[in-house]
Each structure stands twice: as structure tokens, then as C-alpha cells.
Image (spheres, rainbow, N blue to C red):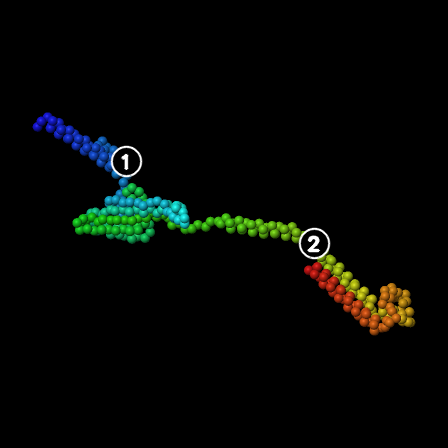
Amino acid sequence: MSIDSALGALQSITTTISIADNTIKRVAADFGGGLGGGSGTGWAAQLRPASWRGVPFGVLGGGIKFGRRTAVHEYPYRDTVWVEDLGRAVRRITMTGFLVGDDVIAQRDRMIAAAETAGSGELIHPTLGQLTASAVECVAEEKWEQGRVFQLSFTFIESGKRVFPSVQVSTGSAVLKACAQADAASKGDFLASTAAALKQGAAVVAKVASTAATWGRQAQRLANDATNLYNMVGTLKGGFGRYAKGNGIAGIAVAAGAVSSAANSIPKLIALGSAARTAVSSAVEKLTSTASGLGS
């Protein structure tokens, strides 16, 4: 072997050793170790053993769908749309894994029981950590050539607490209610402050009504006196009138002189007296009715 061949072989061996050394360091770093010992903070050290409702399983891969919920609004004659943000979208997690071991059938049965349990459960994801999720779909596949290995596929949805609608105060309704209360309070204050004046006014009106009724009774009595047949005799011609015009009834005779004439007679005077009493009675009734209306 020539010297050049020996040098080339030596350089090739050196390159291979360097590549192997770098590979060993990278693998050691991934698993949290090192040739001289590591702190355990590498990528592999951050992975967590996966499980669903406490049933462990191996993980081959997975994915997560996330983003925002939106509503796209399109309008006529516009080239752009308005995207309405409706909050964070639900997180959908997909995973592929496996169960392995001589007891793989028992493991599979426990996984079926966990997947068929009602409600949300605890999911331990290798990189996402502990989550509260609901299993939407779980599939277990068995193949002859794989022996004691069952392949799994999952679809999970991250779930939260059940929250019921809460009651909130409607500002508009509260303002309307406050306005109604203020209106009622102002009316009550007005009535309280004017009650005394209203009572005094009612007393005055009642006094006026009582006075009017008294005047009506007096007018009726005077009308009866003025048209009394006895007093009418003084208006007759001849001796009856002369005797009737004595001092006893002088005042009434003077008042009755307006109806004295040559054609006067007792029947006519009686008719005039009756008509006068009827007119006065009608006027008194109107006055009394008006006074009663004021009093009420």
C-alpha cells in the first residue's frame, strides 16, 4: 500500500469518526443526556407519556387544528368581504398510536371502555400536556403480521366547563323603570303638597252651595207670599181693594200695585199668581241643582 493510499484511508476514517461523534451528540442531546451527563432539558425529556382517561398508549404522530371562528360576509358589487371574528375556534387533536404487549387485548378493552365513557375526560398529550377533552372518534386496527401490536387513531376536541346563560340587567329597561318611579314620586309629592289647598277649596265650594240653597228657599218663600191669594185681594177695584190697602199689609200692597188694572179679576189674579210661583220654583230648582253640582 502506498503512502498516498494510507493517508486517504486515514482521512476517511477521521471523517467517519467525526460524523459518528456529531450523531451521538445530537441523539444524546435529544434524549436529555450527553457524553459527560446532561441536565435532562432536551427535546425528548420534555415529552410526556400519552394516556386517555388513565389508559396509556404509545404515540407515532399527531396533529392539532386551531384558529379562530369566523363568519364571512359577502356583499353585492364588492370585491372584498368582511370577516367577522366570533372567538377562538375549537381545538381538534388527532393522534395515531399503538398498544403493544402480551396483554394487548386487555389493553384494547380498557381503551374501549375509556372511549365509551360519557362526558369529558383527561387526555395527556406528549407535547400539549394535560387537557380536558372529548373523544369524537377512536379506532383500533389489528393485523396478523403485526402480532401483538394494535394500531390506534384518535380524534379529540378540547372541551371546557358547561356554562349556562347568565342574567344581566337591561340598561334600557332599567332607565324606563327609573323614569316611571320618578314620575310616580313626583305625582305623589304634588298630591301631598296640594291636598290641604284642595280640602280648603272644597270647603269653600260647599259653603257657596249651602248659601245658594238658602237663597233659593228664601226666594221660593217670597214668591209664595207675593202670590198668595190673600195678598192679591188688595189689587182688586172697589171696596175690597180699599180695605185690603190698610196699614197691616201696606208693604205687600204697594209691591202688588204693578199688576193692578181695571180688568183685574180674581180668576185672572189666581192664574197670574200660579204662573209666577211656577217660574220662581223652576228658577229655584236650577239654582239648587247648580249649587249641588258645586258642592259635589
Q: Residues within 10 Å of mark 2 (few under 14, many from 20)?
A: few
Q: Nearer the viewer, residue 25 or 73?
A: 73
Q: Tell me, yes or no, if residue 132 can be seen here.
A: no
Q: Which residue is mark 2?
A: 200
Residue 219: percent from left, percent from top: 79, 63
Relative placement, left or right, of 203 versus 165 is: right
Name the quadrant of the N terminus: top left
Q: Residues within 10 Å of mark 1 (few under 14, many from 20)?
A: few
Name the quadrant of the C terminus: bottom right
- Residue name at image x 41 percent, y 48 percent: 77
- Residue name at image x 51 percent, y 49 percent: 172
Say what secondary structure mark 2 lies in.
helix
Say what secondary structure mark 1 lies in.
loop
Relative placement, left or right, of 50 versus 196 is: left
Residue 225: percent from left, percent from top: 82, 67
Residue 143: percent from left, percent from top: 19, 51
Q: Contact, CB < 8 Å: mark 2 with mark 1?
A: no
Task: Say which amino acid is labelled 1.
Answer: Thr
